Image (cartoon, grey):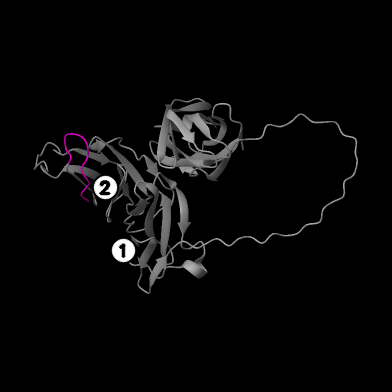
Amino acid sequence: MLLPDQPGPNPHLAVSAGKGATIYLVNRDNLGQFNASGDQIVDEINGQIRMLFSTPAYFNGRIYLIPNSDIPMAFDLVNGRFASNTPSSQGSIIFAYPGATPVVSANGTLDAILWAIEDNSNGIAVLHAFDPNNLATEFYNSEQNSARDRAGDYVKFVPPTVVNGKVYVSTASQLSTYALIGSPTPTPTASSTPSATATSTSTPAPTPTPSAVVTVFKTAKPSIKPKHSIPGGSFRLNTTGGVTVTSVTITFSDPSLFAKARLTATSHGTQRSATVSGSSSTETFSLNRPLPIKAGKSAQFSLNLKGAATMTSGATSSQAVTAVSAGSAVVGGLPASLGSVTSDVKQ
């Protein structure tokens, strides 16, 4: 895939991968030529994806891939090189053979959606819509209401087509078109008004009203292998008043399972992150910069866990969000469980 011009010494780049499961970033003006001692290219990543039979997608400084029998992944670019050898975001849904070709739609750099077609176990094409800033967040899939939205029989290597606010999916049996459906206005329901009854009660101390609430919408992948990374759970912070988040505290019942943990936070195109290493049962993820969230808006947080090099077979760790630092704002919904992870160690 050819990339738009990038900052840095090599503005003209292309990205590729294949059966070797290595992601290559090459200079289109100088491909490097053959060298028996090593690759002479701009950058490469090994060991993070399975074989790739599809085409990557690019949006806003990120490369998206959905390899064979693997999950959606994103890798960031900084100054014409990979920002890290590990994904900056990844989903939890495994796309069976042959993977998928993702397509990103957006209004400039806003309101982005990543679309992909999956072959489910019954040979049905399933259209998925993900948040490109947090691939663990699925906005929609066509099997949520299969009677209305089922796409048809799956065809390999066919990407979705997005144009004029509609998504087109071509299958072996039909051509399906997807668009927004207006939400009906709920009908008010009358209720009886109870009569007042005088009682003698003491006046309780007022409880502060939360201006933000934590809601977990995806728990952690249940197992982890040594040195492998998994999604560690995702939660949303919904606000009624504007807040600015500076850190998040998460507890680990058995931190020895993990070598590293990374928390990524996004709110309407703004992204922040924090990484911790160590073996503390309580970790504070201090964001690299404060994350402002406007009144009535929300932010999404995703935890990524990397397994320790050595771990005890069958060991289990439970994670929970216990605090969100947002100035003087009162945050409700805590503690919020992110689920449990068990070590997957071969005997």
Query: At x 37% / y 66%, what residue is drawn?
Result: 169
Say which mark, if any, is on residue 99: none
Q: Is residue 344 visible?
A: no
User: Is residue 102 depicted above or below 340 in this figure?
Assistant: below
Between disc 2 and disc 1, whose residue precedes? 2
Q: Which residue is mark 1?
A: 158
Outermost bottom residue: 173
Picture coordinates of residue 183 (x, y %)? Answer: 55, 60
Check the image and report above or below for 130 versus 334.
Answer: below
Q: Secondary structure at mark 1?
A: loop
Q: Position of residue 81 (x, y in %)?
A: 24, 36
Q: Position of residue 97 (x, y in %)?
A: 34, 59
Amino acid carrying mark 1 in the image: Val
- The residue that appears at 20% across and 49% down in the rendered structure is 2
The percent coordinates of residue 152 (x first, y second) are 41, 70
- The amino acid type of the residue labelled 2 equals Ala
Instruction: Choose top left, top right, bottom left or bottom right for residue 161.
Output: bottom left
What residue span does the magenta drawing correspond to? 1-11
Viewer can see residue 136: yes
* 334 lies above or below 175: above
Q: Residues within 10 Å of mark 1 (few under 14, many from 20)?
A: some
CA–CA distance in space, label 2 to label 1? 21 Å
Identify the residue under disc 2: 21
Residue at position x 53%, y 37% in the image: 316
What number of labels is visible?
A: 2
Image side of residue 9 versus residue 258, left or right? left
81 is within the stretch colored magenta: no
Image quadrant containing the C terminus: top left
Q: Residues within 10 Å of mark 2 (few under 14, many from 20)?
A: some
Secondary structure at numbered mark 2: loop
Does the segment drawn in magenta span residue 8?
Answer: yes
